[in-house]
């Protein structure tokens, strides 16, 4: 039965103010049931306050074969990191 | 000891305990891993309710130590659950019918029990009712899906209703224990929500493509310890370990 059901990706917001993070996936026949399965599978131990589910097929993922073109060019652009500023000591949480 | 309240706590605790044990039988056997977890979650919610009710009952009775003593050291005739919850799982559809009928009734009972004059009962009910809302929604959803699914799922759902329907009237009767607590505003009168209950059943049955048969006359008295043959077998499994190895610890 499970193999007939499409796969859904589950995202959980752990606390108010934080963003939803990917938690895993579930099988379900539709969105409503995917939400129930996500709730029962991933929030049993107070893991979150909000859930998103999206059918895995609807996610456009980058192709691992393209990763050198997509990601490697960023490797030697250290000037893009804001690490060259002298921060006043009063500034916290940076 | 207030005998009526003590018995009432056993009825509430035993319903949850026995249904929980039934649901746990699905563990590792459900149609999918997601459904497996879903049924186990319902079972764990019910086990929590049972622990609270039976601990409260145990606190009123000097002869029993705690909820475990009541759960594991009583025989079938001393259990006060309704016959519906002890019925075998059958197939998934039969399990869902049992859950839908019980959770729908339990939700309406606990909505009212949350306003009990007994503060402990009110607190347990208020906590449990959030869990039960989910049980009622989940099982209603599955009723509709199975009813409108395939010919096979529809046939199995109908067979499940046929098995369970005769056990519904027991939920709706009040005996002298209920009546004593109803008078004291500790427990609600099941008659006060019978119409709402039947309306909800009719609504979900209609969506699931099921006919609502008239309720038969009640023949069951699980509340007095007269059980079907299924309860003894369930208790054998549930009570075996603590009876064979008293004081066993994890």
Image: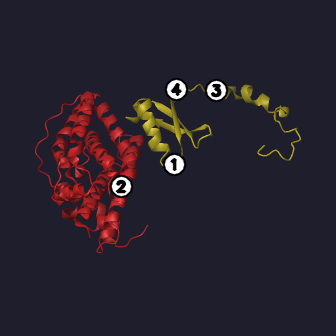
Nearer-N-terminus badge (3/4): 4
Residue A57's tag is 4
| Disc 1 from disc 3: Cα separation | 34 Å
Using the numbered discs, state the Cα–Cα distance from disc 4 to disc 2 in whole angstroms.
47 Å
Front residue (pair B229, B223): B223
Q: Are marks 1 and 3 on the same chain?
A: yes
Question: In x, y percent, where is residue A43?
Answer: 49, 45
Q: Which residue is mark 2?
A: B122
The residue tagged 1 is: A46
Circle 3 sits on which residue?
A63
Give the CA separation, mark 1 to mark 4: 28 Å
Q: Nearer the viewer, residue B106 or A30?
A: B106
Q: Secondary structure at mark 4?
A: helix
Element class at badge 2: helix
Q: Nearer the viewer, mark 1 or mark 3?
A: 1
At numbered mark 1, what does the secondary structure look like: helix, strand or loop? Answer: loop
Lateral position of residue B106 relative to residue B232, left or right: right
Quarter holding residue A21:
top right
Q: Horizontal and vertical percent for residue B41?
A: 40, 48
Q: Tell me if I can see residue B20 in this picture.
A: yes
Quarter of the image for residue B212 reads top left
* Separation of residues labelled 2 and 1 (CA atoms): 24 Å
């Amino acid at each position: 039965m499970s193999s007939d059901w499409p796969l859904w990706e589950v995202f959980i917001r752990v606390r108010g103010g934080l963003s939803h993070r990917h938690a895993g996936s579930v099988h379900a026949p539709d969105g409503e049931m995917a939400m129930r399965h996500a709730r029962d599978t991933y929030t049993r131990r107070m893991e979150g306050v909000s859930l998103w589910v999206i059918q895995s097929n609807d996610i456009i993922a980058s192709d691992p074969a393209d990763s050198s073109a997509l990601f490697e060019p960023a490797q030697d652009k250290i000037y893009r990191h804001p690490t060259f500023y002298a921060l006043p000591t009063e500034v916290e949480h940076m | 000891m207030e005998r009526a309240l003590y018995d009432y706590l056993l009825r509430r605790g035993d319903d949850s305990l026995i249904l929980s044990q039934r649901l746990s039988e699905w563990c590792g056997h459900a149609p999918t891993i997601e459904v497996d977890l879903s049924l186990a979650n319902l079972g764990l919610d019910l086990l929590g309710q049972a622990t609270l009710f039976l601990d409260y009952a145990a606190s009123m009775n000097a002869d029993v130590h705690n909820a475990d003593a009541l759960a594991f050291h009583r025989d079938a005739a001393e259990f006060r659950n309704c016959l519906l919850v002890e019925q075998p799982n059958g197939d998934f559809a039969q399990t869902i019918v049992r859950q839908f009928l019980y959770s729908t009734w339990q939700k309406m009972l606990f909505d009212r029990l949350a306003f009990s004059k007994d503060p402990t009962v009110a607190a347990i009910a208020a906590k449990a009712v959030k869990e039960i809302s989910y049980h009622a929604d989940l099982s209603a959803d599955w009723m509709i899906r199975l009813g409108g699914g395939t010919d096979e799922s529809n046939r199995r759902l109908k067979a499940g209703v046929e098995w369970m329907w005769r056990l519904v009237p027991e939920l709706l009767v009040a005996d002298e224990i209920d009546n004593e607590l109803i008078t004291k505003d500790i427990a609600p009168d099941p008659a006060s929500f019978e119409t709402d209950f039947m309306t909800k059943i009719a609504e979900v049955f209609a969506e699931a493509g099921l006919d609502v048969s008239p309720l038969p006359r009640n023949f069951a008295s699980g509340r007095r310890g007269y059980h079907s043959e299924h309860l003894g077998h369930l208790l054998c499994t549930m009570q075996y370990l603590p009876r064979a190895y008293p004081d066993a610890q994890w």
